[in-house]
Image: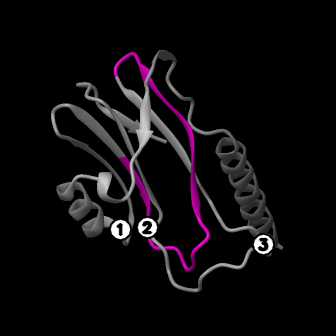
Amino acid sequence: MHQKKIKTLFFLLLTFNLCLCFLNGCEKNKLPAKTGEIEYTIVTGSDIPKELKQLIKERKENPFELTFSDNAYLYLIKGYGKQKSGGYSIKINQLYEAKDTLVFDTDLIGPKVKEKVSETPSYPYIVLKAKFRELPVTFY
């Protein structure tokens, strides 16, 4: 009988912890207050600096966050690592200036259920280009 009470208590504690994790996970970490807008462009292909392309290639297998500067521009890069197929896209939720940081918030969007996609693995990443700022970047 004692073991049954322990198992029940363990199950209840586990369930409670999972509920807390779920509830906390429903809302992204509280983002810092916005203090300014940032104008940016999405950069692809030959518009990505050669050195940056190499850095992305070296990191693409695993999720990564990277900043790169050529002194005139700041590049913000978010990679989601190896995915089992094609059909993924990246949604930019927001990019803005906060008190002591730049906030870069993105989400990976998977292929739609019935979407026909390549079976070849993909390595989704996004590169944004903005005027250079001497602030750290917080990725979400």
> Which residue does the numbered mark 1 point to in the structure image?
60
Q: In this view, does 95 lie above or below 36?
A: below
| Image location (x, y in percent) of residue 75 | 31, 42
Left or right placement of residue 106 versus residue 138 in this view: right
Name the residue rendered at 39%, 16% in the picture.
Answer: 99
Of mark 3 and mark 2, the one earlier in the sequence is: 2
| Magenta stretch encompasses residue 95 | yes
C-alpha gap between disc 1 and disc 3: 25 Å
Q: Is residue 62 above or below residue 103?
A: below
Q: Are marks 1 and 3 in contact (CB under 8 Å)?
A: no
Q: Give the range drawn in magenta.
A: 77-100
Name the residue rendered at 39%, 48% in the picture.
Answer: 43
Which amino acid type is shown beneath numbered disc 2? Gly
> Which residue does the numbered mark 2 point to in the structure image?
81
Which amino acid type is shown beneath numbered disc 3? Val
Q: Are marks 1 and 2 in contact (CB under 8 Å)?
A: yes
Mark 3 element type: loop
Q: In this view, does 14 lie above or below 136?
A: below
Left or right placement of residue 55 versus residue 19 in this view: left
Instruction: Give neighbour class at mark 1: few <14, some 14-19, many 20+ (Cα, 10 Å).
Output: some
Give the number of the disc on residue 113: 3
Q: Looking at the figure, which quarter contains the N terminus?
A: bottom right
| Magenta stretch encompasses residue 29 | no
Instruction: Give neighbour class at mark 3: few <14, some 14-19, many 20+ (Cα, 10 Å).
Output: few
Q: In which quarter of the image is residue 100?
A: top left
| Image location (x, y in percent) of residue 105 | 51, 39
